[in-house]
Image (cartoon, helix red, strand yellow):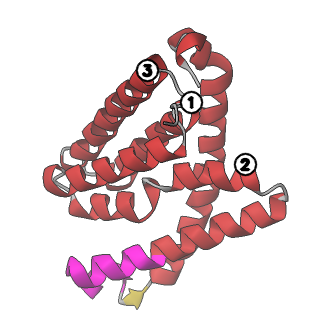
Amino acid sequence: MKKSSSSPLKTTFKVTISGVLSALSLVFMMLTSLVPLGTFAFPCMAGIVLMVIVVEAGHKWAWGAFICVSLLSLFLAGDKEAVVYYIMFFGYYPIIKGAIEGKIKTRAVQFVLKYVVFNAAVIGAFFIAAFLLAVPAEEYTIGGMYVPWIFLLAGNIFFTIYDLAATKLVTYYIVVLRNKLIKPKYRK
């Protein structure tokens, strides 16, 4: 019989940190119905929280947390458009961001891959919002002009800022907060 490589204490820690941070992500998603501007801000924050799970427990645990938060958000969050944004991008991007930056050494390739993922997710979310959620075409017009391409350009600018902020936040967590919040004996 093969022995598990992690001790029961470390497994308990992974379950605990994943559960607590998943609950925090779900709270952010539920807040989308209370704050009108929360449609974009809260899914961002809910996803960023998952970066701590990646650091402390690994990608498998973070994917599990993402799936749980996504499913519970479908039932509990009031703003379904925000749930679409979380599921289509903000929830999983922090998980794959670490994988992209960890496995691909060339910055240019990282950059291109991140933008391909973002643009595919945004275009997919647009069609889901437009067709499944029946968002009327008038929502995408300003002064009679159809502007999704302008939204996509603005989204790419936002994504650049978001990606940099996510990098700074995870770096701050690892360098400053990690040793203050979590004792080394509990980590991997």
Decide: is 106 above or below 179.
below
- Residue that mark 1 sits on: 5
Decide: is 22 above or below 143.
above
In the rendered view, does 86 fall on the left or right side of 170? left
Tell me, yes or no, if residue 40 can be seen here. yes
Whether pointer 3 and pointer 2 mark residues with C-beta atoms closer than 8 Å, the reply is: no
Q: Residue at x 59, y 43 (%)?
A: 166
Amino acid carrying label 2: it is Gly
**Number of the label disc, if any, that sits on residue 175:** none
Residue 54 coordinates in the image, percent (x, y): 54, 39
Q: Is residue 132 magenta?
A: yes
Decide: is 38 above or below 131.
above
- Residue that mark 3 sits on: 8
Question: Which type of secondary structure does the marked residue at label 2 adopt?
Answer: helix
Does label 3 or label 2 sit earlier along the sequence?
3
Give the CA separation, mark 3 to mark 2. 27 Å
Q: Is residue 38 magenta?
A: no
**Number of the label disc, if any, that sits on residue 102:** 2
Give the CA separation, mark 1 to mark 3. 10 Å
Does label 1 or label 2 sit earlier along the sequence?
1
Q: For the residues carrying marks 1 and 2, which lies nearer the camera in this image?
A: 1
Q: Quadrant of the C terminus?
A: top right
Residue 116 coordinates in the image, percent (x, y): 63, 73
Residue 186 coordinates in the image, percent (x, y): 52, 16
In the rendered view, does 169 fall on the left or right side of 11? right
